[in-house]
Image (tube, rainbow, N blue to C red):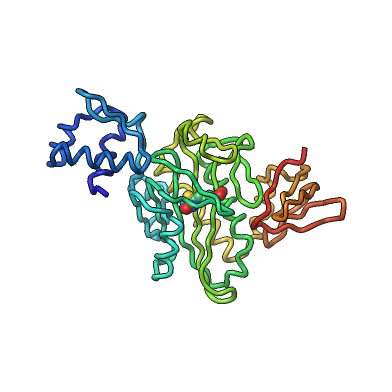
Amino acid sequence: MSALTFPILQVLSDGKFHSGEDLADRFDVTRATVWNAIQHAENLGVEVFSVRGRGYKLPQAVDMLDEQVVLTAIGEQRAWFNLQLLDEVDSTNSYLMKQAAKGAPHVTCVAAHIQTSGKGRRGRIWVSHLGASLTFSLLWRFNCGAAALSGLSLAVGVALMRAFQQLGVQGVSLKWPNDVLYDNKKLAGILIELQGDMDGPSAAVIGVGVNLRLPEKVLKRIDQPAIDLASIGVGVNQGELLGTLLRHLAEVLRTFEEDGFVALRAEWLSYHVYHNRPVRMLMPDGRDVHGTVRDVAEDGILLVETALGMQRFSAGEISLRTGT
Ligand code: BTN
């Protein structure tokens, strides 16, 4: 670990060459200390070009999270948020789950430049690298128990869609329960972890990962078709994206806690890529169930018309694919 790694990466984030000597002078350390800090960055998976006579350089410019940019994009509600921007963490969800258990306040948001063990749904890993994806988690405390939160993950999808629309990102849709797709490829994912009693007060840690600019070698490590904002021509600043997402999350979560998912259901259906389309449900026991998606219930259960009639599917271990 080197305390200088991220200050140096901040300098290198312009994508230009910076000599070891300049960096050493700037931080009042030796060139060997700069080299050690760069080594740590490389251990974290950051590619740093090192060219004799020219210095160090990132493959391309990276926009680092800036607190002021995030707060400005949140807008009027910004004072409400307890925002923590971390350089590196295992997983913003794991970190915030621990903070929540220790009493972190409602509406705490933790974002990180690098996650070393990002988690996806169904035990997957969420691959992320510096500048490649926006990774953050939001803590929301509910008076109701965890049992009443079954539609929450779909509600969060609505917030993401509203944020993408505000930012002018066209052609994005949702896939039940809560994948954000573009051209049938995954653009963003949501992982919600709960704390508390089934019927007492509860807390949700809502983790969101948005692909920003995935290098080819990162894309190859992802086990499903994925896409990023850069390749669909969206060059939004990471802080502005985070602030916009938080603003819409807060609005949607307030609607959800007051009126439940039912208040967001029609909007969710309008975003669902498989609405009234044939699908194949991959069941945990290896079976395939074919049918046509007809609706979603107030608790987020998917209603699929099959040969056996209307069947209800709850998220968890089920995977949804196009049926054609
Ligand atoms: C999915 O599988 O679609 C869910 C992906 C969720 C990834 C985000 S990144 C920020 C937060 N921290 C994690 O470890 N996971 C979530």
Answer above or below: position of 154 versus 259: above
Residue 277 location in percent, x, y? 77, 42
Residue at image location 25% in from the left, 39% down from the top: 8
Residue at image location 33% in from the left, 45% down from the top: 66
Does residue 309 appear left or right of residue 137 in this picture?
right
Residue 114 location in percent, x, y? 38, 46
Residue 160 location in percent, x, y? 54, 48
Answer above or below: position of 131 versus 56: below
Residue at image location 83% in from the left, 56% down from the top: 310
Image quadrant where residue 42 sits: top left
Viewer-side residue, 111 vs 21: 21
- Residue 246 visible at all: no
Does residue 266 appear left or right of residue 24 in this picture?
right
Viewer-side residue, 39 vs 278: 39
Screen quadrant of the C terminus: top right
- What is the total number of numbered labels drawn onto the structure image? 0
Image quadrant where residue 180 sits: top right
Residue at image location 69% in from the left, 49% down from the top: 269
Does residue 94 appear left or right of residue 165 in this picture?
left
- Residue 270 visible at all: yes
Does residue 157 appear left or right of residue 100 in this picture?
right
Residue 163 location in percent, x, y? 52, 45
Which residue reaches farthest top?
53
